[in-house]
């Protein structure tokens, strides 16, 4: 290696070490030095020089004494305020005044996702929450941006359950996550939350007893149902994205577009939500609840994550009856357990079998 190339390689390695430390310090606050030392074959002393420089640059904070020292990412932005909601409140003005100034210097694709997600969520607060005020939070460190909106209104799941006459807030969540759901179709497409949840690295929506989280890295989700004694007021939306994210809005929109079809033609449905609390998915009524409005799409991905088995009636309604009545909708299964996959095969095989006629 030439003398001219040596400094460049060292600078590149230093950058890689710094990036590794920043990416891993949250999950390894007490042993990130050891982790970096093992990863790059560097002495602890050399890694500590990196730590000292990152602290001096304002990217890390050191806590505790030498032996028990822990490191945390230092927030370069930590802003919050309360916004009054009235007929004159506009989400783009709130963005420009209270959020955008804190995000200067972000890569364009990340800034676009932040603007899209924040304005979609705040518009929902203005038009649907029935709240008189909302609180917003903007946080940024060397690794990620966090945007959060808390309103003091009716609660998104309670409102949907009320307006759509659904018996349970969990079913309201299922309908919301299908996309194309709105209680004001003349003014909205019902796509905002659907795309926002998938654009951010982590998206959490909480209201009442329900908390839904989506993780973009592995396209997984989690639903937590709190105890009956717990009832959070209003709605909380929490969105996080990496500063170095390569995701773009066009990536997200393209993923759910269907070739030769205009607009939002593909959706993803979390099958687990079709049941009440943790009941098994065995009945036709559960399946009918699941397929409601799916005829508005050209392709539906049925995600069976956390579903261990389904009943014969549920499978038949979902994979034979629905396709027979809606041949233009393509169903795709994902994360099906072996037991679920066998039941799906059984139901699909029944499509080509002539059903016996009843004598009445």
Image (cartoon, rainbow, N blue to C red):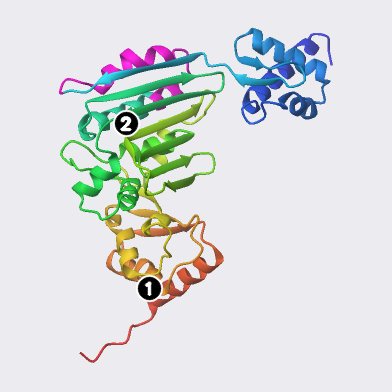
Q: Identify the residue shown where x is 81% and y is 20%.
A: 44
Residue 246: give its label: none
Identified at 40% across, 33% down, the residue is: 250
Helix, strand or loop at mark 1 = helix
- Percent across and percent down for residue 1 are 84, 16
| x then y, percent, for residue 326 | 29, 63
* Circles 2 and 1 in contact, beta carbons < 8 Å: no
Instruction: Give the farthest residue toward the bottom.
Output: 359
Secondary structure beneath label 2: helix
Quarter of the view holding residue 155: top left
Residue 337 sits in quarter = bottom right
| Residue 89 is one of the magenta-drawn residues | yes
Report the side of 5 relative to 189 (left or right): right
Q: Which residue is mark 1?
A: 313
Residue at point 66%, 15% (across, down): 62
Query: Which mark is on residue 121?
Result: 2
Determine the main secondary structure of the stretch shown in magenta.
helix
Task: Choose between 54 and 107: the one closer to the eye.
Answer: 54
Above or below, 196 against 140 in this view is below
202 relative position to 136: left or right: right
The CA span between labels 2 and 1 is 38 Å
| 72 displayed left or right of 266 | right
Q: Is residue 344 visible?
A: yes
What is the crowding at mark 2: few (fewer than 14 residues within 10 Å), some, or many (at least 20)?
A: some
Could you tell which of marks 2 and 1 lies nearer the N-terminus? Answer: 2
Bin the neighbour count of mark 1 within 10 Å (Cα to Cα): few under 14, some 14-19, many 20 and up.
some
- 65 part of magenta stretch: no
Coordinates of residue 281 in the picture (x, y in percent): 41, 65
Name the residue rendered at 26%, 44% in the picture.
Answer: 158
In magenta, the rendered stretch is 87-114
Residue nearest the observer in this picture, 189 or 86 = 86
């Amino acid at each position: 290696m030439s003398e001219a190339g040596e400094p460049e390689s060292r600078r590149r390695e230093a950058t890689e070490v710094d990036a590794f430390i920043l990416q891993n310090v949250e999950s390894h606050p007490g042993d990130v030095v050891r982790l970096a030392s093992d990863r790059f074959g560097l002495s602890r002393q050399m890694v500590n020089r990196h730590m000292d420089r990152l602290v001096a640059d304002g990217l890390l904070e050191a806590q505790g004494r030498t032996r028990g020292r822990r490191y945390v990412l230092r927030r370069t932005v930590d802003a919050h305020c309360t916004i009054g909601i009235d007929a004159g409140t506009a989400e783009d003005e709130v963005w420009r005044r209270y959020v955008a100034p804190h995000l200067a210097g972000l890569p364009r694709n990340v800034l676009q996702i932040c603007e899209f997600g924040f304005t979609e969520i705040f518009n929902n607060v203005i038009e649907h929450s029935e709240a008189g005020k909302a609180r917003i939070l903007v946080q940024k460190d060397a690794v990620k941006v966090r945007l959060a909106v808390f309103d003091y209104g009716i609660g998104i799941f309670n409102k949907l359950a009320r307006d759509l006459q659904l018996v349970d807030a969990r079913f309201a969540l299922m309908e919301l996550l299908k996309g194309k759901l709105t209680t004001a179709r003349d003014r909205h497409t019902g796509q905002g939350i659907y795309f926002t949840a998938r654009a951010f690295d982590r998206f959490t929506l909480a209201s009442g007893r329900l908390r839904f989280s989506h993780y973009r890295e592995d396209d997984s989700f989690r639903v937590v149902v709190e105890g009956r004694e717990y009832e959070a007021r209003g709605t909380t939306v929490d969105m996080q994205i990496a500063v170095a994210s390569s995701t773009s809005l066009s990536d997200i929109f393209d993923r759910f577009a269907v070739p030769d079809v205009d607009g939002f033609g593909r959706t993803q449905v979390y099958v687990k939500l079709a049941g009440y609390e943790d009941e098994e998915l065995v009945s036709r009524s559960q399946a009918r609840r699941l397929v409601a409005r799916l005829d508005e799409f050209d392709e539906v991905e049925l995600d069976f994550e956390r579903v261990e088995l389904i009943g014969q009636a549920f499978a038949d309604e979902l994979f034979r009856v629905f396709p027979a009545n809606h041949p233009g909708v393509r169903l795709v299964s994902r994360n099906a357990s072996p037991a679920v996959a066998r039941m799906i095969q059984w139901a699909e095989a029944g499509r080509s079998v002539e059903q016996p006629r009843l004598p009445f």
